[in-house]
Amino acid sequence: VTIVLYYCPMCTLVCTNSSILQEHVELHLMENGNHTEENGHDQIFARMLQEQEDQFRKAEESKTEAEEFRKLQKQYGLDNSGGFKKQHIQNMEKAVARGQMKPAEYHRRKVELMESLAAGLDDGRTKTSGLIKALYKYYHKEARDVAHVWLCAETDHYHSTDGDKGWGCGYRNFQMLLSALLKLDQYKECVQEIPCIPKIQAMIEDAWKEGFDPQGASHFSRRLKDTRAWIGATEMYSLLTFLKIRSRIVDFHCPTGPSGTHPRLFEWVKTFFSLDSSCVEDRWLPKVIQTSRPAIYLQHQGHSRTIVGIEQKNNGAQCLLIFDPGCPSHVMQKLLHPETVGFSLKILRKFGSGLKHKQYQIVAVDGTLTEEERQVQLQHSRILQAERVP
């Protein structure tokens, strides 16, 4: 409860009641022989009340700002409520209490979790492999309304678990991207394994310690470990550069089509995946183009996903193919079976009408960096700027 204090404009008295203060001020005026000067008295009292009102308003604004700040901290996982391990164990304990998990299963899963965290590696429980290969086979035989489809290099899907539900999408997308890089010879010196989420957080902190993205580091108070903090395009870029992987951030900062759509984003993605066959006209392209390009990280307000390909329909319409970390394994695995892949494609397809946030950012990987190039990028990241389209 906020207590409003009223200060006497003529002495050091402080009251909590405006009526008492008014009587007190009138005594001052009487003692000074000014009690007949009603106009002067009214002006003083009016000024006093205005000052008290201003103090009350400022106190309420400060209270509101503090409450909003606490809400933002909680929303973005910076409220010291614990990180991946704590959330995972708490959710398993709740499952036991509800009878959804047996105590023996709880203890077995907890041991596996601790072993995974100690090794710094993802346990693979949420991974679905072979999806790009399954899509390649499907498009060869089916999808008669598709003129061409470009697919990225083989990429595994990772989804959020009890440990990162609600905040872990950026980390899961990073795991998807790494799974593609692991399969490409060009990146094998940069990537050898798929880290778990706490390990990814530690890696980002290491990048900050080396000097990458000081503004972003300051935003997180240079700490990610044991938090539920969301990460975005700038953290992705810093981490990739830290690992000597060349990447770029492209900012589609406003819609470029009717009804708030982003056709320039779709064209950019098509160009990126078409670079392997850029000298071939569309009419001579095969229907399915399996590229060696890595998947693309896609960020918008509140969520991030991974672009693994793009369709071009017979009528010219374009459709992105997207892996969403919010989609569980049992749903993604339907894409692996010939009898369910066609129906399940709707979980991947995103037409222009389905991407209508005001702003999107992508992080695209394009080769590796020498140590000298890495140092140049380190200097550039001190004032990190994205490429803007348009």
Image: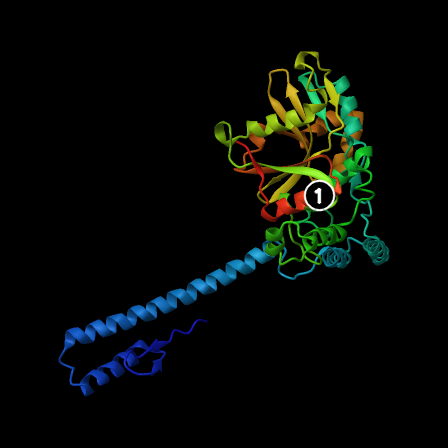
Q: Is residue 225 visible?
A: yes
Find residue 314 and report its horizontal and vertical position in percent.
63, 15
Foreground residue among 188 and 85: 188
Q: Residue at x 72, y 46 (%)?
A: 242
Q: Secondary structure at mark 1?
A: helix
* Residue 127 picture location, percent across and down: 79, 41
Between 9 and 250, the one lying in front of the other is 250
The residue at the far left in this view is: 36
Q: Given the image, on which type of amino acid does mark 1 rest?
A: Arg
Kindly identify the residue that appears in the image at 60 percent across and 21 percent down.
Answer: 317
Q: What residue is shown with label 1? A: 374
Up the image or down, 206 lies above or below 194; here it is below
Q: Image height check: is 125 above or below 114?
A: above
Left or right placement of residue 98 versus residue 64 in this view: right
| Residue 122 position within the rendered picture, expressed as x and y whole percent measured from the top left | 80, 47
Q: Residue at x 53, y 59 (%)?
A: 69
Q: Find the residue positioned furthest to the bottom.
A: 31
Instruction: Check the image and report above or below for 196 versus 308.
Output: below
Residue ranking furthest to the front: 372
